[in-house]
């Protein structure tokens, strides 16, 4: 239908149309008396005002603007008018103030959008009460008929307490159940207005509050942090134009191409349904059965079998938006975009043996690391970059940018840094914030839009849906951690756990009785990018999706030799846990399409021959434009912060040489490392000069895998004491085996020799990760040790079969 010219909206409400509500400030005592009673004349006044307002809306002026392409691209603002305060109210008695009800609602406010201070509570100096605010006299005893008598049903205090306790748990997330969160901010480097009207990028230096949740995928809520797994990297931007959730992972691709396969994938990787094992592990039959029948997962498998899947810390891993998104500017022009987060501390990983041991001695390893870093003021920081490209560019790639099993290599489209994310505040309450936070791939703001990635389409549906059962109803956006800082006004009403108390009788649009409010925002609101669609409805994928190996080969070819060795070892380990020989062989036949040495290495580890390569789904393999991409190696990003926040164990026992101990400790702390004195037991330890230090940790309670580096101190007596403890040899052995730096001072050289460790590498060169020194040589040796720690690992030391 032809569109009639747009008419100007009815006059807008002036913001100061009603008196500011007299709300008491937090902590301010409210009056206990009702201040006023609405005069009877107010009802008549209201009726007259309503009629006057309704008369201004002679007809629906916006109706004509609902038709035609032009109106879709720039929708008109909804008609609205000044609404006298009286009309906005639900009742004339609203004017009667009370301690509970307060006064009238603020003009147009949505209180849910205020800072979290409105819900943060503190029991200091407060007495214990029931949930109804009744003071509890005795929190030790239930109510009984006589001291030895039966408990009484009328004990409402006991029953309320137990009932609440009975319902403390909510369903955990289906995937990403185990996670850790932090608050922080995003700061834009420059205005991106030419590319996008998205609020966080509006101007240089603009700050947007964020909440971030990192997670593992497969394990249950209480599972270990160091499982081999993908990590979630979900960021909620509380922008001034609404919440934008960039719900990404630490790996830029995914296992599958279409949301239709997601439940199958998750069922395959989760514990097997008959006996609920194994927990938080992909090393079992059903996972490998499924992925080996889904060759599009090959690329993702390369990443998951690489060290990326066992990060050293959430602070030391990248993040990716995975899908291709669309950025849209004020003129409606779109640019395709991939999002990348890069940690300032660089990308670092664990070794598999180390990850397995950490999961025993500290299942909260990553959660603790994040928490402690923020508490100590070492705020994790990540840089956000975008890859920007046009539809025309994308059409020329050998792969499809709508296929989430593919990256856009940086050699094809370089990264543009656009801002930084800083995590500077731990949550007050894990459940209220980290557990109740509800990320959603559908939460976008004006300036950010979707593409037709079929995986993304499923996600747009899934996240809200899952919160309905996880958070118990449609009002989860009102939970404080989820509430946007942008005002929320709509006509959605009721439902379980509704928090907002909406004034007035109008909960529909269009309306004249509420002055047209809340009115549609028109072009100032979210306008979907008008992607042309002319197609048959069908269930199929484009042919470019059928190439499954080029980028797996690219990833493998871009790894350093040690990273390649780790990938082979990871496949070997995982497949050794697969009990069905045919599945092992099927996976190796997939790998034969990636790289012959990879397939041969894995086959050798399993004691089988490399089978014929798996038949490809495509007759002619398109030529990959990029054969090597150096930044795909974890080693490409050592970070900029040296040894800051690295954890270093210094073994101590009675008689430790005092001067060298202090020198080492002082230098490491000055360089920003965290130094722990680890003794045979915790508590005071006398040094060689008679002074006393406090061992903060023991060989027993903080095993060596929890540290990035080790110092073996000087002092004959101390070394003799340490040598007599079998755990010391294990302590040093793990550090050595995991290629970590060790500083060996004076007499403690015998401890190193005691485990049969060599300071010379297989090629005859010195192991730079082992710094030997007498106490006198220390200042220089500590500098070399600092350099060795900054290098993180000394992989040259590693042999596939550990020698020590
Ligand atoms: Fe998710 N995903 N996902 N996912 N996902 C969830 O949402 C889903 C996918 C990701 O810290 C769930 O609130 C489908 C890719 C993260 O709370 C659920 C598909 C990527 C988190 C869900 C995918 C992700 C989730 C579970 C295939 C990387 C944790 C609980 C179409 C770009 C967020 C929840 C947090 C969580 C569905 C695939 C990332 C069930 C259907 C690809 C980081 O809704």
Image (tube, grey):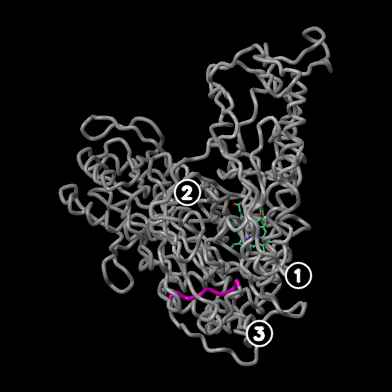
User: Tag 2's secondary structure?
Assistant: strand
Horizontal and vertical percent position of residue 460: 67, 60
Magenta stretch, overall SS: loop
Quadrant position of the N terminus in the picture = bottom right
Residue placed most toward the observer, 753 or 53 = 53
Disc 1 or 3, which lies upstream in sequence? 1
- Measured in 3D between alpha carbons, the distance from the residue under mark 1 to the one under mark 2, in whole angstroms, is 42 Å
- Give the label, 2 or 3, closer to the camera: 2
**Label at residue 408:** none
Q: Depth-wise, is mark 1 or mark 2 nearer the camera?
A: 1
Label 2: few (<14), some (14–19) or many (≥20) C-alpha neighbours in 10 Å:
many
For mark 3, give the secondary structure: helix
Compare residues 244 and 644 and report the one nearer the observer: 244
User: Could you give the CA–CA distance between mark 2 and mark 3, rounded to whole angstroms?
Assistant: 41 Å
Q: Name the residue under label 1.
A: 1
Q: Give coordinates of residue 201: x percent, y percent.
A: 46, 57
Which quarter of the rendered image does ligand 1 occupy?
bottom right
- For the record, the magenta segment spans 404-410
Q: Please give the residue where the numbered disc 3 appears in the rendered image.
A: 543
Q: Looking at the rendering, which quadrant does residue 419 occupy?
A: bottom left
Q: Nearer the viewer, residue 218 or 579?
A: 218
Give the mark, 1 or 2, whose residue is nearer the N terminus: 1
Disc 2 target residue = 208
């Amino acid at each position: 239908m032809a569109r009639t010219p747009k008419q100007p909206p009815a006059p807008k409400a002036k913001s100061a149309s009603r008196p500011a509500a007299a709300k008491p400030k937090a902590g301010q005592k409210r009056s206990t008396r009702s201040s006023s009673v609405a005069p009877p004349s107010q009802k008549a006044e209201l009726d007259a005002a309503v009629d006057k307002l309704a008369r201004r809306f002679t007809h629906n002026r916006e109706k004509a603007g609902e038709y035609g392409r032009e109106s879709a691209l720039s929708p008109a603002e909804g008609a609205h008018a000044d609404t006298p305060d009286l009309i906005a109210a639900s009742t004339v008695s609203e004017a009667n103030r009370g301690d509970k009800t307060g006064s009238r609602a603020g003009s147009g406010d949505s209180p849910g959008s205020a800072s979290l201070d409105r819900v943060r509570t503190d029991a200091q100096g407060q007495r214990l009460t029931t949930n109804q605010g009744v003071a509890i006299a005795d929190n030790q005893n239930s109510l009984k008929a006589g001291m030895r008598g039966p408990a009484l049903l009328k004990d409402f205090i006991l029953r309320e307490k137990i009932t609440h306790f009975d319902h403390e748990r909510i369903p955990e997330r289906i995937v990403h159940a185990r996670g850790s969160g932090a608050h922080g901010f995003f700061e834009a480097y420059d205005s991106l207005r030419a590319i996008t009207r998205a609020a966080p990028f509006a101007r240089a230096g603009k700050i947007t509050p964020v909440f971030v949740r990192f997670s593992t995928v497969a394990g249950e809520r209480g599972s270990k942090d160091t499982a081999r797994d993908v990590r979630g990297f979900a960021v909620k931007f509380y922008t001034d134009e609404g919440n934008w959730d960039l719900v990404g992972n630490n790996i830029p691709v995914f296992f599958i191409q279409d949301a239709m396969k997601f439940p199958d994938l998750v069922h395959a990787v989760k514990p097997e349904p008959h006996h609920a094992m194994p927990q938080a592990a992909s090393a079992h039959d059903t996972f490998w059965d499924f992925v080996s029948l889904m060759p599009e997962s090959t690329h993702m498998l390369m990443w998951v079998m690489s060290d990326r899947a066992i990060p050293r810390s959430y602070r030391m891993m990248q993040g990716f938006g995975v899908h291709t998104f669309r950025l849209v500017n004020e003129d409606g022009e779109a640019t395709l975009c991939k999002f990348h987060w890069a940690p300032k501390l660089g990308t670092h990983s664990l070794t598999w043996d180390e990850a397995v041991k950490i999961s025993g001695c500290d299942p909260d390893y990553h959660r603790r690391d994040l928490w402690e870093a923020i508490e100590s003021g070492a705020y994790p920081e990540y840089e956000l970059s975008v890859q920007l490209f046009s539809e025309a560019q994308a059409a020329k790639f050998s792969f499809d940018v709508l296929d989430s099993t593919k990256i856009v290599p940086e050699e094809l489209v370089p990264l543009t840094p656009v801002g930084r994310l800083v995590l500077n505040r731990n949550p007050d309450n894990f459940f209220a914030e980290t557990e109740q936070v509800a990320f959603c791939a559908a939460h976008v703001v004006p300036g950010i839009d979707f593409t037709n990635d079929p995986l993304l389409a499923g996600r747009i549906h899934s996240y809200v849906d899952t919160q309905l059962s996880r958070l118990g109803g449609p009002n989860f956006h009102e939970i404080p951690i989820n509430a946007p800082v942008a005002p929320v006004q709509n006509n959605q009403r009721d439902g379980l756990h509704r928090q907002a108390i909406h004034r007035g009788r109008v909960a529909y649009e269009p309306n004249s009785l509420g002055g047209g409010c809340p009115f549609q925002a028109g072009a100032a609101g979210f306008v979907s990018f008008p992607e042309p669609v002319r197609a048959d409805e069908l269930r199929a994928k484009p042919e470019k999706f059928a190439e499954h190996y080029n980028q797996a080969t690219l990833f493998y070819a871009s790894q350093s030799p040690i990273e390649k060795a780790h990938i082979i070892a990871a496949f070997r380990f995982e497949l050794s846990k697969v009990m069905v020989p045919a599945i092992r062989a099927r996976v190796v036949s997939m790998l034969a399409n990636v790289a012959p040495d990879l397939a041969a290495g894995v086959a050798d580890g399993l004691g089988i021959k490399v089978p014929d390569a798996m038949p490809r789904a495509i007759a002619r393999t398109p030529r990959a434009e990029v054969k090597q991409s150096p930044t795909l190696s974890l080693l490409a990003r050592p970070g900029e912060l040296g040894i800051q926040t690295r954890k270093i164990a210094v073994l101590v026992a009675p008689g430790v040489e005092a001067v060298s101990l202090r020198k080492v400790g002082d230098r490491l702390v000055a360089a920003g490392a965290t130094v722990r004195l680890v003794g045979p037991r915790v508590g005071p330890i006398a040094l060689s000069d008679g002074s006393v230090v406090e061992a903060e940790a023991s060989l027993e309670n903080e095993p060596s895998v929890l540290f990035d580096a080790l110092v073996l101190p000087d002092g004959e007596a101390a070394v003799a004491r340490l040598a007599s403890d079998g755990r010391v040899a294990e302590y040093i052995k793990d550090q050595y085996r995991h290629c970590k730096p060790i500083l060996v001072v004076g007499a403690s050289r015998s401890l190193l020799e005691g485990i049969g460790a060599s300071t010379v590498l297989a090629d005859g060169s010195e192991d730079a990760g082992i710094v030997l020194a007498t106490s006198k040589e220390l200042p220089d040796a500590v500098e070399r040790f600092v350099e060795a720690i900054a290098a993180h690992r000394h992989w040259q030391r590693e042999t596939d079969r550990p020698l020590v």
